[in-house]
Amino acid sequence: MAVLLTGGTGYIGAHTAVALLEAGREAVLADDLSNSKAEVLERIEKITGKRPAFYQIDISDGAALSKVFEAHKIDTVIHFAGFKAVGESVKKPLDYYKNNLNATIEVLRAMLKYGAKNLVFSSSATVYGPYGESPLKEDAPTGCINPYGWTKWMSEQIIRDAAKAHPELSCVLLRYFNPVGAHPSGLIGEDPNGIPNNLMPYISQVAVGKLDHLTVYGDDYNTPDGTGVRDYIHVSDLAQGHLAAVSYCERHAGVEAVNLGTGRGISVLELLRAFERVNGVKVPFEIGPRRAGDVDECFADTQKAASLFNWRATRTAEDMCRDAWNWQSKNPRGYEITSKA
């Protein structure tokens, strides 16, 4: 039986595909390539010796998605596909609601039609909003401050309602904190379109000379060094978390929301200094104004993942920084241009 990864050529999807293939699983990838590159498939094959089946489709197209299910015996879906830029979601809320919610609905429709019972959903710690105190437990109050976060929250609710109506479904809602790093081979990593929205690729692109400097948004937070504290998790640890969630789904029914993080907060300046120290490079930066909605600190309580999945993050901040730079320095302009050089 196969595992379908929607959005499977994206940053987290590609690393999860590697983890599945290395574990002897059959992986089928579907992606419209709006935020990823087909070159990823060649890189996955170089790492694992296996090339997953791939379909370039819009997951919201139910007819196209049905053809994937008809071609493969799929019992599990890991649903990554969706628009993901917080700032863009504020500017284009209707696009985000239409795309992300329709994708979740069509995935569930296809699963019910073809008898796939296991769903692992790519959710986010953004569902907690700015209201809970860290470490955040899965039963902390939810409530989002941007349309991207609300699409994750609403998708979680859609999945809960579908599972209530169809008790045979087993669903895990994985609430990620801040994925960073890259595969240690340097073959796959984060390749954002345009200016990065996240800290680590921004640091890496400044270090490689693609961007002039890093802007640190605020240095007056109630934290040891004044900069915001977040829970950064290595993308390879995150991938292993998905593998553990799939195994859990296969043995249990119902719905569980589970945090994936390290359980430790790291400040912006801490991560920046670790990157410089580990890689021997300087990253110029300047202090800018706070961004609306940013909180002092946000990190996970990870006890539930340990209890249900027997999973914990094992990679350090130094590992994250080393692997991120290994990817960026080997691929200074990302997948597509590098592959044509």
Image (cartoon, grey):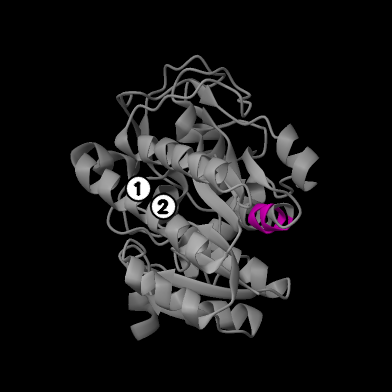
Q: Amino acid at mark 1?
A: Leu
Q: Is residue 37 above or below residue 193?
A: below
Q: Does 118 appear in magenta?
A: no
Q: Are marks 2 and 1 in contact (CB under 8 Å)?
A: yes
Residue projecting furthest to the top = 222
In the picture shown, does residue 153 fall above or below 334? above
Side (left or right) of 310 relative to 71: right
**Location of residue 258 in the rendering, given as x and y in whole percent from the top left corner:** 63, 39
| Residue that carries the numbered disc 1 in the rendered image | 101
Q: Quadrant of residue 216?
A: top left
Quarter in which the C terminus is drawn: bottom left
Residue 63 % position (x, y): 33, 71
Residue 104's label in the rendered image is 2
Q: Nearer the viewer, residue 331 or 37?
A: 37
Alpha carbon separation for disc pair 2 and 1:
5 Å
Q: Is residue 248 left or right of residue 321?
A: right
Q: Classify mark 2: helix, strand or loop.
A: helix
Q: Which residues are magenta?
A: 241-247
